[in-house]
Amino acid sequence: MSVVSAQVLPGDAPAMPQAARGAAELGPRARLWPSLAAVYRAQLSRARVARIPLLFVATFQSVGITVMMRGVVDSGGEAQSVVAGSSVLVVAYVALNLLSQYFGQLRASGGLDHYATLPVPPAAVVLGAAGAYASFTVPGTLVTAVFGCVLFGLPLSNLWILMAVIPLAGAALSGLGAACGLLAPRPELATLLGQLGMSAALLLGVLPADRMPQIVRLARDLLPSTYGVEAYARTFGAHPDWAVVLADLGVCAGVGVVSLAVATWAYRRAAVR
């Protein structure tokens, strides 16, 4: 003869705690800045070995262009444009060329599915990758700037302005590079768009604006890196107009916000497909 508890008889529901009957509460959403820092560190460690040779190529290319232009222009306003444009070209090479290739390959290989499963905001993925790639441009930009100033006899006193030019111009160009990689239907097309963008930064940023036709100057004004080049070039004068320098940097910052927002939208669009 067995004894059965009344709590397990048919028709009687087992007793449940009141708290368990309610809906389970979800954990707090991941915050932007901690997620951004985590993605940045991960991207920095991943790209440290793979991208250093390419960064050396970018620096060597910019230094070579500076040497080549030494035989074309003399000291003065044209030399200031050449040195500033060659320095920012390192940022353009990494932000436009390498970042568009990275996101294009990430989309083609299904790597976006990995990021989509992580509890991080889409903006953190885009900003973290862009920040990591932009960090690699600092040594090459400084080396190119110092070499160009010594080569053309320009002052080194305002070299500190690059600490503002690099992140602001890098943000504007990184957003464009990421958007190209995420919106391109094939990785080969993303690579092509990155190469075209870098070529535009080379031709429109390094060559003195006074020697360009008017229609080319208009195209130059549409390139975000132009304002970083102008901001740096203006500091070579004896009495720089800092209000105009800040205005140029403000344009870079505004374009950077818009381009990174577009890249974030492109990431959301590519991740759900």
Image: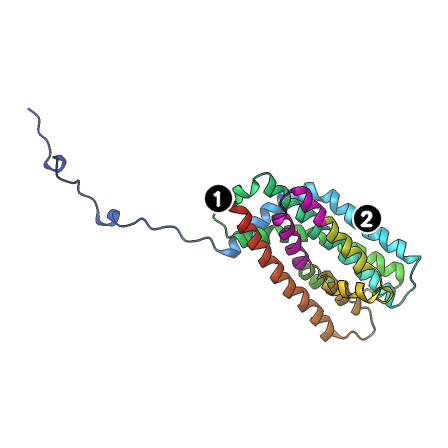
In percent of the image, x 16 and y 40: which residue is there?
13
Asked whether residue 259 is drawn in magenta, I would say no
Foreground: 182 or 157?
A: 182
Asked which secondary structure carries label 1, the reply is: helix
Which residue is farthest front? 215
Label 1 crowd (10 A; few <14 / some 14-19 / many >=20): few
Residue 202 on image: x %, y %:
79, 55
Residue 263 seen from this side: yes
In percent of the image, x 73 and y 73: which residue is there?
244
**In screen coordinates, is 9 left or right of 77?**
left
The residue under label 1 is which amino acid type? Thr
Residue 199 on image: x %, y %:
77, 52
Asked if disc 2 and disc 1 are in contact, CB closer than 8 Å, the reply is no
Disc number lying in front (2 or 1): 1
The residue under label 2 is which amino acid type? Phe
Residue 160 seen from this side: no
Q: Give the range drawn in magenta.
A: 170-194
Asked whether residue 191 is drawn in magenta, I would say yes
In percent of the image, x 62 and y 45: which residue is there?
185
Asked which secondary structure carries label 2, the reply is: helix
Determine which quarter of the picture holds residue 237: bottom right
Circle number at residue 60: 2
Q: How many labels does the image show?
A: 2
In percent of the image, x 53 and y 52: which residue is there?
122
The CA span between labels 2 and 1 is: 39 Å
Determine which quarter of the picture holds residue 203: bottom right
Residue at the spot of label 1: 117
Classified by dominant secondary structure, the portion drawn in magenta counts as helix
N-term-proximal mark, 2 vs 1: 2
Residue 256 on image: x %, y %:
64, 61
